[in-house]
Image (tube, helix red, strand yellow):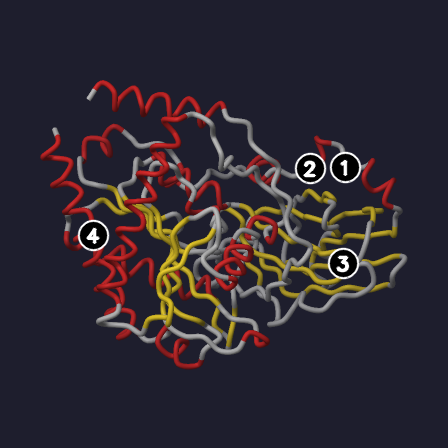
Amino acid sequence: MASRTNQRVLLGCALLCAAVLPWADSSRLRAAESQPQPAVAAANFPIASAARLAGDGKQTRFILDINQAVTFRAVTLADPYRVVVDVPQVNFQLPAGTGAAGRGLVKAFRYGLVMPGGSRIVFDLTGPAKIAKSYVVEAANGQPARLVLELEEADRAAFVQALAPENRPELRPTIAEAQPATAPATTAPETAQQKADGRPVVVIDPGHGGIDNGTQSSGESEKNLVLAFGLALRDKLEKAGKYRVVMTRDDDTFIPLNDRTKIARNHKAALFVSIHADALPRAEGDAQGATIYTLSDKASDAEAQRLADAENRADAIAGFNLAEEPTDVADILIDLTQRETRTFSNRFARLLMGEMKSTVRMHKHPLKSAGFRVLKAPDVPSVLVEIGYVSNKGDLEHLVSEGWRSRAVGSMAQAIDGFLTKRMATAGSSN
């Protein structure tokens, strides 16, 4: 028992002290088509009703119509070139497709919630540009208030020089300047009451959210489909009463990848299950069925690598880069813990496949692995489940079906129960 305690202490210290590596995102950022936030949930927030671009490759103006003036902060980012505008939480009621097409210096833009109390607009630029002016016009003469951003073409040297460290946006401090907001409660360490609960913790992680829609097809967004699935799984597990369930998000909020794993580690989770619904590019044909992914340093196949690359760009889609946990920590105790964790993750993946294949359609190769950042908690068994392909007509029909969801949730809950019951029995016999 003493050695296990020492191991945990050393593990925690090593992780806190390990140097982090900057994570550079790919230049293939997608301009996801944002979905309006529910009017009921956002009734008390400012409403954005229209957005437009004007100008050319030398000067470009962005105008956002909003029903009341707001505070904001605008900054530029390089590699790839972007402008990030942070505002207090806004109810975006913009026409479908807004931002998908660009003009002048802007290739495309996207928008959405990045945390409770804060929204973000991200502009993908055609090249280096500077913010010449940025201001809010008060409502007057029957016209709405307007947030205006004026961009001018700049050379690379001037652009990079303007990127002082203090001007680079960090999620929570930037939003806090605009409007005080608290981080989601799930990111906080365990309370004394939670620690006294004693039940194993299962963390359910619906992918994407907020400004990051994930994949989209036939009017359906991945972020909404996986949230509905995750909430149904939570309800199923909570009804049984054997496990304490923590959601990384239970609404349309963006959660950075590292924060998702921190939630699992802060709650000393016994299991982490990330829920997604992939789309296959048309050039790669048509695929269908559920797939279960575990962490590995080398992807099991090209499709797994493509998916991991796409999912690992989530933070860049939201307009900023976060540091990535190092994958090769030298400490032998951490290495041993990671190996043990991967063994348990693989064991759960096989058990989950066995349960799911009897109730839902599985991919022809249902067990895969790749370097997903969201699975890198070294001491929490973790899997990422692609419950289907939104790009496949049959899968999409299942994903929006409550009957299919109920069956899939039931088989997943059964697998979770079987896995944790065995682990608790094994842990109890070793004490």
Residue 188 is situated, as x and y percent measured from the top left of the image, at 38, 34
From what the image shows, is residue 159 above or below residue 60? above
Checking the image for residue 62, the label placed there is 3
The secondary element bearing badge 2 is classed as loop
Amino acid tagged 2: Arg
Residue at numbered disc 2: 168
The secondary element bearing badge 4 is classed as helix
Amino acid tagged 4: Glu
What separation in Å lies between label 1 and label 4 (alpha carbons)? 48 Å
Q: From the image, which quarter does the C terminus lie in?
A: top left
Residue at numbered disc 4: 238
What separation in Å lies between label 2 and label 3 (alpha carbons)? 21 Å
Mark 4 vs mark 3: in front:
4
> Closer to the N terminus: mark 4 or mark 2?
2
Residue 384 is situated, as x and y percent measured from the top left of the image, at 39, 55
Amino acid tagged 3: Phe
Q: From the image, which quarter does the N terminus lie in?
A: top left
